[in-house]
Amino acid sequence: MIPCGGARVYLLLRPLDVDSVKRKVIEKHGHYIPHLAHMYLDVVISSPETQRRISYARTLSEEDGSFLFKNLPPDRWYYVTAQALTEQVMVSWQIGVYLREAERVQVVLTNTNAALPVYMPANLQLQNKVP
């Protein structure tokens, strides 16, 4: 597991439609391009409309990949939506979490629960290939 320091993490009140992002890439380019899907999702997450209508809070992850949202109203669903868009890897997550009264929730974001396939540039894939 590689910690993603500096990843943008949003706490949303409703989930984003990741499937529509995938469809938009296919419609525009004729086939699915993971790199562009991550970029389109980034545009949707950071759009003023998303921020105004469904964003509750946002933060950046620490160097070790950790992040924290404090003093959240309980008894509701939150959607942790995060993106690590670096030169080495592009990862987008969206995880639903129901928060109960006096509860602390820990969310671990890995490649197995990513909302889009993890994208790594081809030249880095070759460098990381195990013989």
Image (cartoon, grey):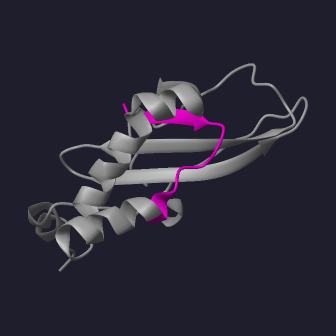
- The structure residue drawn at horizontal position 75% and vertical position 24%, both measured from the top left corner, is 72
Picture quadrant of residue 84: top left
Picture quadrant of residue 5: top left
Is residue 130 a member of the stretch shown in magenta? no
Q: Quadrant of the N terminus?
A: bottom left
Is residue 14 a member of the stretch shown in magenta? yes
The spot of residue 90 in percent (x, y) is 30, 52
Q: How many marks?
A: 0
Q: Is residue 93 above or below residue 20?
A: above
Q: In the displayed image of the protein, which residue is found farthest to the bottom?
A: 131
Q: Quadrant of the C terminus?
A: bottom left
The spot of residue 114 in percent (x, y) is 48, 59
Q: Is residue 24 left or right of residue 98?
A: left
Q: Is residue 123 above or below residue 11?
A: below
Q: In the displayed image of the protein, which residue is found farthest to the top?
A: 71
Q: Which residues are magenta?
A: 6-19
Q: Is residue 65 left or right of residue 12?
A: left
- The structure residue drawn at horizontal position 59% and vertical position 42%, both measured from the top left corner, is 80
Q: Is residue 79 visible?
A: yes
The spot of residue 125 in percent (x, y) is 17, 67
